[in-house]
Amino acid sequence: MHPSPPPPPPPPPPPPHCVDSLVNEDELQALKVELEDMRRNREELRLKLRKKEWECEDRQKERDQERNNVDKLNQKLTRKGDELKEAWSRQQEVVDKMGQLQERVRNWV
C-alpha cells in the first residue's frame, strides 16, 4: 500500500488591508442602485443636451434665413432707390428744359 499524500495546506489568510476593503452585500446593492441611477441620469442629460443642440441648430437656420431675407430686401430697396433717384434726375432735366423753352417763347414773342 502506498501512503496517502498529505492534505494540501490551507490558503493563507487575507492581508489585513483587504479585510477593511470588503463591502457587505447591502453596501454593494446600494452602490449598484446608485450606479444605475447615475447611468439613467447621464442618459437623460445626454438626450436633453442633444435636444438643446437641435433647437440651437433650428434657431440658427431661422436666423440665417431671416438674414438672407433682410439682405434681399435691402438689395431691392437699394435698386428702387437708385431708380427713384434716376427718375427724379430725369424729371429735373425735363423741368429745366421746359423752363428754357418757356424762356425762349417769351423772348421770341
Image (cartoon, helix red, strand yellow):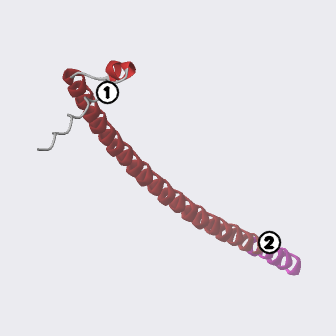
Q: Tag on residue 96? A: 2
Q: Is residue 94 left or right of residue 15?
A: right
Q: Residue at x 79, y 76 (%)?
A: 97
* Label 1: element kind: loop
Decide which of tag 1 and tag 2 comes sooner along the chain: 1
Number of the label disc, if any, that sits on residue 12: 1
- What is the CA distance from the residue labelled 1 to the residue labelled 2? 119 Å
Q: Which residues are magenta?
A: 94-109
Q: Determine the residue positioned at 70% across, 67% down.
A: 85
Q: Residue furthest bottom?
A: 108
Q: Which residue is rendered at x = 21% and y = 35% of the image?
A: 6
Label 2 sits on what residue type? Answer: Asp
Q: Position of residue 17 (x, y in %)?
A: 39, 20
Say few, some or many: other residues with alpha carbon within 10 Å of mark 2 (under 14 / 14 to 19 / 20 or more): few
Dot 1, crowdedness within 10 Å: few (<14), some or many (≥20)?
few
**Near-viewer residue (31 or 74):** 31
